[in-house]
Amino acid sequence: MKDIETAEDIYNIVATFYDKLLGDPAISYLFTEVVKIQLEEHLPVLVTFWSQALLGTGGYFKNLTQIHLDVHHKSALTPELFQIWITHFNSAIDVHCQGFNCERMKTQALNLATVMQIKIAQENNKSLHN
């Protein structure tokens, strides 16, 4: 198997990833009921984000942390949900490729999930003290 080299490689990964997420009732409700994601709009955004992170293409300007905090305010993003997310994400990568960029993508995803959980905990603590 080859490594991640192009935006098309990334698209294949994120499309597989969302197939897995939407097929898992433990997490799919976030995308179908809470956020009501439009995949045809969302997948290109994810491709831009990951292309920037892995291939240095640029073009992603959204506030990733705030987007997830906004979702958390609608429906709690728990550590269990992040674990499901990481498991499906890594599995989607492993289906399509292997190599240095694949491992970087997994590491960056885990780092993002960790940072998001820290930010959510900080928000929760602020709410408790106000």
Image (cartoon, grey):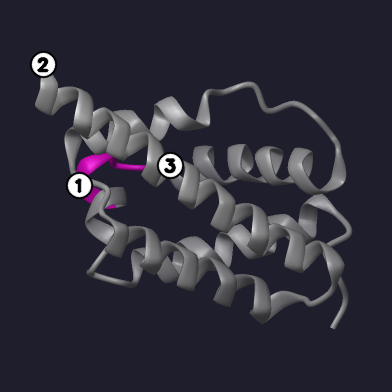
Task: Look at label 3 and name its amino acid.
Answer: Met
> Disc 3 vs disc 1: which is toward the camera?
3
In the image: residue 62, left or right of residue 75:
right
**Helix or strand or loop: what does disc 3 sit on?**
helix
Q: From the viewer's perspective, is the residue at label 2 or at label 1 nearer?
A: 2
The magenta stretch is 32-37
Amino acid, disc 2: Asn
Name the residue nearer the viewer: 38 or 102.
Answer: 102
Q: CA distance from mark 2 to mark 1?
A: 29 Å
User: Who is closer to the viewer here, 66 or 92?
Assistant: 66
Residue, disc 2: 130
Residue 62 vertical position relative to residue 21 in the rendered view, above or below: above
Residue at mark 3 to residue at mark 2: CA–CA distance: 21 Å
> Which residue is pictured at 27% across the width and 29% down the height?
123
Q: Which mark is residue 116?
A: 3
Of the image marks 3 and 2, the number of the one nearer the N terminus: 3
Nearest to viewer (mark 3 / mark 2): 2
Please tell me how crowded label 1 is: few (under 14), some (14-19), or many (20+) other residues with Cα within 10 Å: few
Q: Is residue 16 magenta?
A: no
Query: Residue drawn 18% across and 42% down?
Result: 75
In percent of the image, x 41 and y 25: which residue is there?
66
**In the visual, does 70 lie left or right of 2?**
left
The quadrant in which the C terminus is found is top left
Which mark is drawn over residue 33?
1
